[in-house]
Image (cartoon, rainbow, N blue to C red):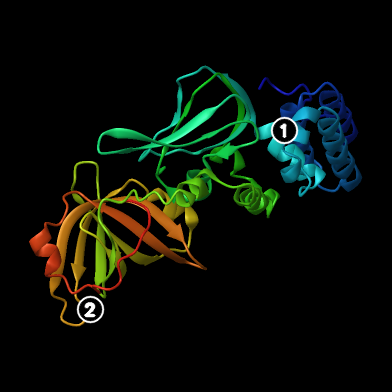
Amino acid sequence: MGELPVQPAASGADMAQEIRRLAAKGAFVEADALREKLISMFPLEVALIVSTGQFIEEEKTTRLDRDHLALWQGLYDTLTEEETNAIYYRLKDDRIGAGKVLFLQSRPNSRLFFVEGGEVVLFFRKSDKNVPLAKVGRGAVIGEETFFGISYSTFSAATQTEVSLRHLSRADTADWPANLPGLLDKLNDYCRKIGSAESVIYQKNLERRTYPRFKLMAVATAVILDQHGRHTGNYFKGDVVDVSQSGVCFSMKCSKQETARALLGRSIALSITAPDTEQELIRSSATIVKVSFLLHNDYHVHARLTERIDDAQFKKLPYDRSSSSVGHRR
């Protein structure tokens, strides 16, 4: 963005006039930035602040792509004018050739994809083979698993034909909780209602875990490791939820979601002990592959062990033999 044309000595009325000029020609980034200056320099000019905000939103609305709005009507019908403009003008339009990967299984992905043309194939790797899950096309949303949650993707997505789509980056929504509270929740609700790619996986009853999970009454202590595998001195504890030969899930208290998100992909030194005797049951390095939000400050941390627990050692653990569960692979 270039330097804004209005000098600091300009009056509030001059700045408002320039804001309207910029908005009228579609320079919304510059208009919004100049309006922020108006607010900071002339906080008592309430009428100008309100009127320029309304003018910008009206101009944004006149430039909306009507075909796009019709395709995603189920989403936009739930939004206010300001929310509609916020999503529309943060979306990036793209056309991608056939055979290109959008995101990979067991890798981070921070984008939400709105498919407007072409076909995308969803698949996952099992026993060194690509197992197809589904093909999706116009009107599908993919990437919501990692966009709204704190996890690596549990499957991959690639273009089968040339695809036209729009995508939204999580970084582009960072100001929404403060400026547009509830907008992310509305977007999340829409993705759930139209049927996510994740639901396709469960509808097909595809078991992607290598090992079953069992409930275990124990305490987990996780020490964060640095990039060289050394203890950082930062650690957290929680009750074990379940255990498998390849991973452990345990609870965690955390007051900030940003802190919880920063744990994704971190290496930890993990110690599992019996709650009463403090006898160590498991000691292993692991990688945090998912952090599930529950309520308030409560989370579940999913950690994949660096080396699986062998059969003999696992059988010695005091887990509930009747509690085998189905879920994401770890």
Secondary structure of the residue carrying numbered label 2: loop
What residue is drawn where x is 20% and y is 82%? 276
Q: Position of residue 229 (x, y in %)?
A: 19, 46
**Depicted 32 relative to depicted 276: above or below:** above
> Callout 1, which amino acid?
Ala
Mark 1 packing: few (<14 Cα in 10 Å), some, or many (20+)? few
List the residue tagged with mark 1: 33
Disc on res. 146: none
What residue is drawn where x is 82% and y is 24%? 22
Q: Is residue 40 visible?
A: no
Quarter residue 165 falls in: top right
Q: Position of residue 207 (x, y in %)?
A: 35, 51
Q: CA distance from mark 2 to mark 1?
A: 56 Å
What residue is drawn where x is 69% and y is 21%? 3
Q: Position of residue 36 (x, y in %)?
A: 74, 38
> Callout 2, which amino acid?
Pro
**Depicted 264 relative to depicted 100: above or below:** below
Q: Position of residue 308 (x, y in %)?
A: 17, 52
Mark in the foreground, 2 or 1: 2
Judged left or right of residue 57, residue 293 is left
Mark 2 packing: few (<14 Cα in 10 Å), some, or many (20+)? some
Secondary structure of the residue carrying numbered label 1: helix
**Depicted 77 relative to depicted 165: above or below:** below
What residue is drawn where x is 38% and y is 57%? 327
Q: Earlier in the sequence, mark 2 or mark 1?
A: 1
List the residue tagged with mark 2: 275
